[in-house]
Amino acid sequence: MAPSKAGLIVTTTQSLPFSVIGNFQAQFSLGSAVHVVTQAGQLGTLDAEPSSFGAVLSLSDVPGHHTDAFLAELSRVLQPGGTLQLQEPVARRKASQDEAKKLGGALVSRLQTQADVERLLLLAGFSAKENIPALPEGGLAKQWTGITPASIGSIQGPLVQPFAVKVQKPQWSTGTSFALKKKVAKSAASAAPNGAAKAPVRLSATDMDDVIMAPQPPAPAVPSTSGQSSVWKMTMDDDDAELVDEDALLTEEDMVRPALPNNPVTDDCGASGRKACKNCTCGRAEMEEADPKTTVKAVLTSDLLENPQSACGSCGLGDAFRCSGCPYKGLPAFRLGEKISLPTSFLTADA
């Protein structure tokens, strides 16, 4: 049986053992339809048509070979649903000073971790990731061998290790499109028997307390001249609805005006020491008429200015925190126990 797909092997080395090619052919049943590209590190693009291969094997002996651009090129030549296997040395840890000195800044910057490679594969559109054993024939470039000192290698291990993974390209390809089937709704005239239009269903409610929505018998069919479909109609007989008088809901107790509290501290006229307001509504005016001794005028004395004190502790904070009968009402904020100093313009009348 002739093979149904071709394969591609891409490697950064100058040569490749025949065993790698044979195993690749047997794994994907490729027969002799296998193309091999060596020294791929010097290639920017692959000389192949899009979707030419059903399986691709990419081997690299240097870290950082599988960039986003190169993975996009591999995805271009791979058929939808095809398999990609790649192998690349990845960094196990951060390079030490001795290792960075031997490699140089250019090579150290090419280091990629396993997570970096997996992220690039995901962004390239590959899925179904599966870690596979690394091929010993993949090897490691000479500039990456022998760079780890024995003292570091015995504790932290080598700087790089081979990483092999198998992924799959989705079945769809970029630019794929298909038409969506649109259901055409049948008209009311075509759905009714004998071509007769469906009668509208009428809903009525005559009782506000118990609204009942019930379909009425269908009305005789009336020929439609506008071509519009049947509609739902709702009617309500407002004349039969019984309205409730709002005043009837109030009781005698609700009609009685509530008595306001007669508290000389919390009433609207203020605490003791102030007279009742002109339009007093809290009952303070009646208290003063019955017993004038109930009002004691608060007087600001010189002792209070020299050594201010506060029973509530809020007099020195300002008028916003003072009660209405506070003797310090109108004065600026001050510290308790310190003399109150007034500015020269405090007693100056406003222009």
Image (tube, rainbow, N blue to C red):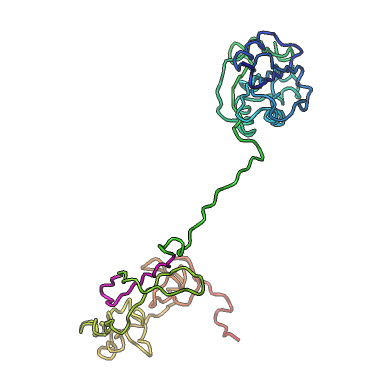
Query: Which is more toward the observer, 348 or 281?
Result: 281
The answer to whether residue 15 shows anywhere in this view is yes
Magenta stretch, residue numbers: 195-212
Question: Relative to 318, does residue 151 appear above or below in the rendering?
Answer: above
Residue drawn at x 71%, y 15% is: 144
Q: Is residue 90 visible?
A: no
Query: In the rendering, at what x and y percent does residue 236 appear?
Result: 34, 78
**How far from the left and from the top, in percent, is residue 46?**
76, 26
**Looking at the image, residue 323 lies above or below residue 193:** below
Q: Position of residue 214 (x, y in %)?
A: 30, 69
- Give the quadrant of residue 164: top right
Q: Nearer the viewer, residue 254 or 88?
A: 88
Position of 167 relative to 13 (above/below) = below
**Image check: 97 left or right of 333?**
right
* Main secondary structure found in the magenta portion: loop
Judging depth in this view, the residue of 228 and 108 nearest the camera is 228
Magenta segment: does it hold 206? Answer: yes
Answer with left or right where residue 230 lies relative to residue 80: left
